[in-house]
């Protein structure tokens, strides 16, 4: 029986390439076979780069055989989100308003950095239209589904990347996050993802959501995300916001334990209602932090829900996208996106500037909070995955997707590093995420705590889709 790689990590794959026990050709062939088998059930891909991936895998195998890999990801199959420009592959933004024939002649910084490192782009993954919401469906490609239970949503907006990661359809996956779009689907699919401090990972073209939007990895393990960040988080002069910062060595090993760390655990931020079974899994994961030697204090960060502030900025960003479209194109949009974009037209300049001031005040508040605490830990999501094809849980009291994602968007306002680490299953057998947040530029604290915690927690693998 042929070897399969449905739980193989990128770190292990690279080790095996080096020792000659695995070839990039075998790995890519296996990934493509499982995409053909599983993707029709979850709809995680907008396109599959089959012919080019096989050609690149052959070239990679030749380099490994010669002992001269191109870069730190040579031969590793990766995916790129449909919002990110990728030379030779369509970037449709999940929208029928985009041109189907491109031309697709340029790589965004992430796509270029991954390719320069030898990674093989195996396909593009789904997003809601313009990445506008916390679930993944769009007028162009339809509904993306959760591999744990296909009747449910994987979350969004990086839902295709998270679903592909959960099934290991490719080993490294690019996501983006302007309000939780990496962390929401990671929590719903049992994968790991981090939104790095704003600016570490270059972004071009600039997001309509401006400095709310972060780019980062989605993977099955923390170390694979660190490996990917070492490639993604390189300067690019096209990014007009970041100023070409140079980040840390993301693969810096964690300490032996967390003795000396002070960690704040907020079960609900002081205002969120959390499902009891989710709260229980999170409590159990937090107990492991204490076993690792950290001092854990139950304390809320001390801010009220910044939803109104966030919405003013988010809706105004959506309006920018709307203004580029004619009436016929606007009529073809996802009705929910059209609604928030039109609501953004009602945000006055005075309201917008007030929201920016409130954002800066929250950022300063959290900077002061982290003078006392190395990390803030919360649940990632207060609810379980719900029916696919809906923006909010059916029959509930929510109006907008932001209403059920209260733990994620505050930290887009503050631009802090924040990650979702799978910490077990709820009473329905669905994944639960633990949310780890650090001060700006202290991303290694998030990664290192997650790496240590990961040793105590089960690797979550979806049940068979057969």
Image (tube, rainbow, N blue to C red):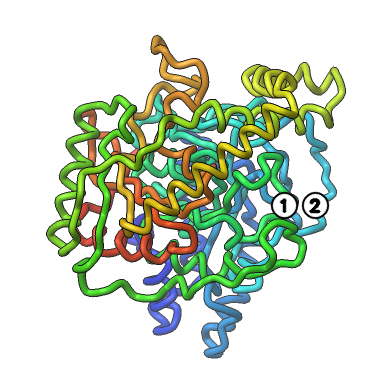
Q: Tell me, yes or no, whether the two marked residues, 2 and 1, touch with CB atoms within 8 Å.
A: yes
In the image, is residue 213 above or below residue 333? below
From the viewer's perspective, tell me whether residue 221 is left or right of residue 362.
left
Please name the residue shown 53% across and 50% down the image: 415
Q: CA distance from mark 2 to mark 1?
A: 8 Å
**Which mark identifies residue 85?**
1
Image height of 399 relative to 99, above or below: above
- Residue 267 location, quadrant: top left
Image point 62% across, 19% down: which residue? 336
Q: What SS does tag 2 mark?
A: loop
Q: Using residue 130 as the reference point, say whether residue 158 is left or right of it.
A: left
Give the SS element for disc 1: loop
Of circles 2 and 1, the one toward us is: 1
Q: Quadrant of residue 100?
A: top right
Pinpoint residue 5: horizontal percent, then vertical percent.
38, 60
Asked if residue 56 shows in the view, the reply is no
**Residue 86 to residue 66: above or below:** above
Closest to the observer: 391 or 266?
266
Foreground: 237 or 72? 237
Give the residue at mark 2. 104
Q: Measuring from the top left, give residue 144's x and y in whole percent.
A: 51, 32
Q: How far across and down, in percent of the image, does residue 17 sit?
A: 44, 78
Q: Viewed as shown, does residue 408 lie left or right of 62?
A: left
């Amino acid at each position: 029986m042929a070897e399969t790689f449905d739980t193989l990590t990128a770190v292990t794959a690279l080790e095996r390439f080096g020792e000659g026990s695995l070839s990039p050709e075998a790995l890519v062939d296996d990934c493509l076979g499982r995409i053909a088998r599983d993707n029709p059930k979850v709809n995680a891909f907008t396109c599959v780069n089959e012919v080019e991936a096989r050609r690149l895998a052959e070239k990679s195998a030749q380099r490994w055989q010669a002992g001269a890999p191109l870069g730190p990801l040579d031969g590793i199959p990766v995916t790129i989100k449909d919002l990110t420009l990728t030379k030779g592959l369509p970037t449709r933004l999940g929208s029928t308003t985009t041109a189907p024939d491109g031309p697709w002649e340029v790589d965004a910084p992430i796509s270029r950095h991954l390719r320069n490192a030898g990674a093989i782009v195996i396909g593009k993954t789904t997003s809601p239209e313009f990445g506008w919401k916390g679930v993944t469906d769009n007028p162009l490609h339809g509904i993306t589904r959760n591999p744990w239970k296909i009747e449910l949503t994987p979350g969004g907006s990086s839902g295709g990347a998270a679903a592909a990661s959960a099934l290991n359809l490719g080993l490294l996956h690019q996501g983006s996050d302007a309000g939780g779009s990496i962390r929401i689907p990671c929590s719903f699919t049992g994968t790991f993802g981090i939104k790095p401090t704003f600016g570490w990972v270059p972004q071009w073209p600039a997001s309509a959501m401006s400095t709310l939007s972060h780019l980062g990895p989605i993977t099955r393990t923390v170390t694979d995300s660190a490996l990917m960040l070492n490639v993604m988080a390189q300067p690019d002069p096209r990014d007009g916001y970041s100023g070409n910062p140079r980040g840390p060595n993301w693969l810096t090993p964690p300490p032996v334990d967390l003795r000396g760390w002070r960690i704040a655990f907020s079960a609900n931020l002081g205002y969120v209602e959390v499902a009891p079974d989710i709260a229980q899994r999170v409590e159990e994961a937090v107990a492991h932090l204490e076993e690792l030697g950290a001092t854990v204090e139950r304390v809320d960060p001390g801010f009220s829900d910044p939803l109104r502030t966030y919405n003013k900025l988010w809706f105004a960003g959506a309006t920018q996208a709307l203004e580029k479209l004619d009436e016929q194109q606007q009529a073809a949009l996802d009705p929910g996106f059209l609604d928030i974009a039109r609501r953004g037209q009602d945000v006055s300049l005075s309201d917008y500037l007030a929201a920016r001031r409130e954002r800066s005040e929250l950022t300063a508040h959290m900077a002061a909070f982290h003078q006392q605490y190395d990390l803030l830990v919360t649940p990632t999501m207060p609810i379980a995955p719900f029916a696919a094809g809906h923006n909010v849980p059916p029959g509930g009291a929510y109006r907008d997707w932001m209403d059920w994602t209260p733990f994620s968007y505050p930290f887009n306002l503050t631009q802090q590093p924040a990650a979702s680490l799978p910490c077990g299953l709820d009473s329905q057998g669905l994944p639960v995420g633990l949310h780890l947040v650090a001060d700006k530029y202290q991303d290694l604290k998030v990664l290192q705590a997650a790496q240590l915690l990961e040793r105590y927690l089960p690797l979550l693998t979806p049940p068979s889709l057969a």
